[in-house]
Image (tube, grey):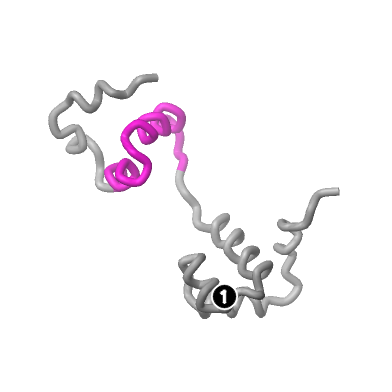
Amino acid sequence: MNYDWIKEIPNYLDFFTNDQKIMIEVVGIEKYMELHERFGSTSFYFSNQSMVYAKKAWAQKNRHIHYSEAARILGVSVQSIYNWREEKNSDNLNLFEAKK
């Protein structure tokens, strides 16, 4: 679908909430409109839990990367990297194992 029509509205961003404006800034108006078409009638929201699990698994898998560098790459504190790497019996490492 073509969403160029919205750009013809003067100050079209005024019709959006602050959160929507941030999303538009990140993905662009065309992708925002596409997401809205697909998920606009749902209660879709972003949960941090999946990203935390993924970051934890990456930190554990990449123990060879210095704590401060891993923290910078993942956008978390050095303490988080330390805590994640010190956890015992973590089953997140199997995310990176090849399927047989």
Could you tell me which residue is drawn at 70 percent across and 63 percent down?
92
Between 2 and 56, the one nearer to me in the picture = 2
Q: Position of residue 27 (x, y in %)?
A: 37, 41
Crowding at mark 1 (Cα within 10 Å: few <14, some 14-19, many 20+): many
- Left or right: 71 in relation to 63: left
Q: Residue at x 60, y 59 (%)?
A: 54
Q: Position of residue 12 (x, y in %)?
A: 19, 32
Residue 67 lies left or right of residue 37; in this view the side is right
Q: Which quadrant of the figure has residue 10?
A: top left
Is 27 part of what is drawn in magenta?
Answer: yes
Which residue is at the far right?
A: 100
Image quarter where the N terminus lies is top left
70 to the left or right of 60: left
Q: Which residue is mark 1?
A: 81
Vertically, is 9 above or below 98?
above
Q: Provide residue 95's location: percent of width, then percent of height.
A: 72, 56
Q: Was residue 79 drawn as part of the magenta stretch in this picture?
A: no
Residue 23 appears left or right of 89: left
Residue farthest left in this picture: 10
Mark 1: secondary structure? helix
- From this view, report whether residue 74 is shown above or below residue 22: below
Q: Position of residue 87 (x, y in %)?
A: 68, 76
What stretch of residues is rendered in magenta?
Answer: 19-44
Q: Residue at x 57, y 55 (%)?
A: 50
Q: How many marks?
A: 1
* Residue 49 to residue 28: above or below: below
Q: Nearer the viewer, residue 38 or 99?
A: 99
User: Most prominent secondary structure in the magenta stretch?
Assistant: helix
Q: Amino acid at mark 1?
A: Ile
